[in-house]
Image: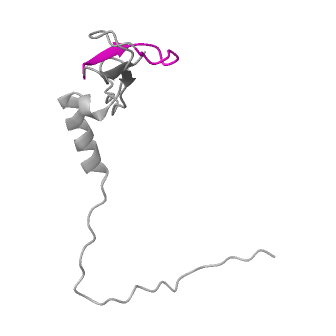
Amino acid sequence: MPTYDYECGACNHKWELFQSIKAEPEKKCPACKKKKARRLIGAGAGLIFKGSGFYLTDYRSKSYKDAAKADKSASEPAPPKVDGGSSKPSESGGSKSSSKE
């Protein structure tokens, strides 16, 4: 169930109310008891999953991060070598084909 922000139009009193999504908005101000309350539109709350069962990389252990970094560097291909010689590709003219009769 979400928490809603309310403001009274008569006395400018602000408060929060924990109520169901299906519940009608509150009309009565708890401070002045007038029916001038209105529900405010909020930005919402951020959601962070912490604890056992959640696998976000932000909350991984240092040993896991170090192992992942080592694994990543080991799997990267070596940079290409710069050859100062000819730029022609080598030709292989020794292809053999066998034919059966």
Whole-percent x, y for residue 47 in the image:
33, 28
Whole-percent x, y for residue 96 in the image:
60, 79
Q: Residue at x 37, y 20 (%)?
A: 36
Q: How is the protein colored in the picture?
A: one colour
Q: Residue at x 33, y 9 (%)?
A: 33
Q: Which residues are magenta?
A: 12-27
**Quadrant in the picture for the C terminus:** bottom right
Q: Nearer the viewer, residue 99 or 23?
A: 23
For the stretch drawn in magenta, what is the main secondary structure?
A: loop
Q: Residue at x 38, y 24 (%)?
A: 38
**Quadrant in the picture for the N terminus:** top left
Give the total number of marks visible in the rendering: 0
Q: Within the magenta stretch, is there residue 20? A: yes
Q: What is the quadrant of residue 46 in the picture? A: top left
Outermost residue, right side: 101
The answer to whether 22 appears left or right of 49 in the picture is: right
Whole-percent x, y for residue 49 in the image:
33, 24
Q: Nearer the viewer, residue 54 or 4?
A: 4
Q: What is the quadrant of residue 14 in the picture? A: top left
Q: Nearer the viewer, residue 86 or 1?
A: 1
Above or below: residue 22 compared with residue 96 = above
Q: Within the magenta stretch, is there residue 83? A: no
Whole-percent x, y for residue 43 in the image:
33, 34
Above or below: residue 15 compared with residue 91 = above
Above or below: residue 12 compared with residue 67 = above
